Structures are given as structure tokens and as C-alpha cells.
Image (spheres, helix red, strand yellow):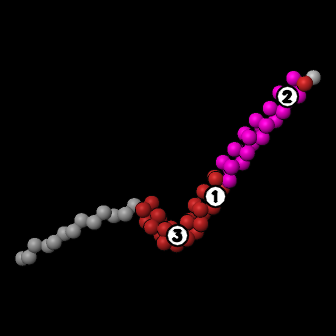
């Protein structure tokens, strides 16, 4: 009688299987979505910086106007 060779393989979880399928089917879409999200983050940061600068300008103008009266 020959000894049977038993190989243990980890059974992937449902989550792992779904992630694998998702990465194959949606790889390009996810890459585009991440790129769009990052572009949006950078644009939001630029807008926030512009708002802060505008607020400083308005406060400076308001300070000069109050001293002039």
C-alpha cells in the first residue's frame, strides 16, 4: 500500500474570492476611479488654500477700512 500524499491548501474566503474577481473584472475602472478621486482631493486642497488666502485679504482690507474711519 502506497502512502497518499496530502497537500493542504488554504481555502480562500468569500471575501478573498470576491476581491480576486473584482480585481480582474474592474482593474481599469478602479484605477480610473482612484485617479479621479486623487485629482478631486488635490482640487479640494487648492480651493481650500484659495479660500484661506481670500479670507486673509478680506480681513486685511477690513482692518484698513476700520482704521480709516
- 25 with respect to 9 (left or right): right
* Distance in Å between CA atoms under marks 2 and 3: 56 Å
Proximity of marks 3 and 1: CB atoms separated by less than 8 Å: no
Q: Position of residue 31 (x, y in %)?
A: 55, 66
Q: Position of residue 57 (x, y in %)?
A: 79, 37
**Residue beneath disc 2:** 64
Between 16 and 4, the one lying in front of the other is: 16
Q: Is residue 60 magenta?
A: yes
For the residue carrying disc 2, how many other residues have a C-alpha within 10 Å: few (<14), some (14-19), or many (20+)? few
* Distance in Å between CA atoms under marks 3 and 1: 18 Å
Which residues are drawn in magenta? 43-67
**Residue beneath disc 3:** 27
* Distance in Å between CA atoms under marks 1 and 2: 38 Å
Helix, strand or loop at label 3? It is helix
Q: Nearer the viewer, mark 2 or mark 3?
A: 2
- 28 with respect to 68 (left or right): left
Q: Residue at x 78, y 41 (%)?
A: 54
Q: Is residue 28 magenta?
A: no
- The residue positioned farthest toward the bottom in the image shown: 1
- Please tell me the numbered disc located at residue 39: 1
Splitting the image into 4 quarters, where does residue 53 fall? top right
Amino acid at each position: 500500500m502506497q502512502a497518499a500524499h496530502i497537500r493542504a491548501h488554504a481555502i480562500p474566503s468569500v471575501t478573498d474570492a470576491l476581491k480576486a474577481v473584482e480585481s480582474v473584472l474592474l482593474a481599469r475602472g478602479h484605477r480610473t476611479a482612484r485617479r479621479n478621486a486623487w485629482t478631486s482631493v488635490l482640487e479640494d486642497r487648492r480651493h481650500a488654500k484659495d479660500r484661506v488666502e481670500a479670507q486673509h485679504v478680506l480681513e486685511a482690507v477690513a482692518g484698513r477700512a476700520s482704521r480709516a474711519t
